[in-house]
Amino acid sequence: MNDISADLVLPAFFSYYESPVKLVETMDSGVVAFRLSKDTGGWVAANDLIDKLLLGGGDETEELTVDEFIQLTEHDRGYYLRGEGPVYALYETVRAIRETQARERRRPTPTEVALIAGIQRRTFAMFEEMLEQDGDPAADPNLAERGQ
């Protein structure tokens, strides 16, 4: 655990080698990092990345807005995870839209962009609620509301 720098606003969101990472404040005013697990869709401790993220990790590191973080997280969950239930059905919907775009060799329409973003905000909250119920300490189902 590291001390928070005076100008750091938490939570903070990053892409590290195109993988979602978030920095969050601890109860004792420290900072911890969590990286998305592409195996489970949950969050794994990644405190070894804190200095790299805060001190400018180079081309492999990018600071993200809340919306960008949610979109990247849900892109990865939808791409890597399979399962049963409502959240997975929504991932399939997004996959179908993207497959249609690829098959037709075109960029997404503004309507498709908005539809995917809305679905991903919803799936983020749904998945984070499942993680929270399972005791994942980094789950934050309310983040999607702050990103709008």
Image (cartoon, rainbow, N blue to C red):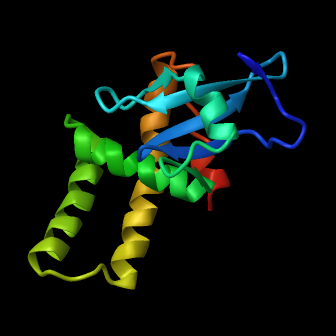
Is 44 rendered above or below residue 112?
above
Is 118 left or right of 38, judged from the image as shown?
right
Is 43 left or right of 87, judged from the image as shown?
right
Question: How many tags in the picture?
Answer: 0
Q: Is residue 90 visible?
A: yes
- Across and down, in percent, residue 76 comes to 33, 45
- Across and down, in percent, residue 75 comes to 35, 51
Q: Residue extending furthest right?
A: 6
Q: Is residue 138 visible?
A: no
Is 82 left or right of 38, judged from the image as shown?
left
Residue positioned 19% across, 75% down in the render: 101
Is 39 rendered above or below residue 92?
above
Residue positioned 63% across, 52% down in the render: 145
Q: Image quarter for residue 84?
A: top left
- Across and down, in percent, residue 35 comes to 48, 31
Query: Relative to the observer, which residue lies in front, 79 or 92?
Result: 79
Query: Relative to the observer, which residue lies in front, 78 or 32?
Result: 32
Residue positioned 59% across, 37% down in the render: 22
Q: Residue extending furthest front?
A: 58
Query: Relative to the observer, which residue lies in front, 85 or 6?
Result: 6
Residue positioned 24% across, 37% down in the render: 81
- Across and down, in percent, residue 44 comes to 47, 22
Q: Residue extending furthest left?
A: 103
Is 113 left or right of 138, judged from the image as shown?
left
Query: Which corner quadrant holds the C terminus?
Result: bottom right
Is 110 rendered above or below residue 95?
below
Query: Which corner quadrant holds the N terminus?
Result: top right
Is 50 rendered above or below residue 94?
above
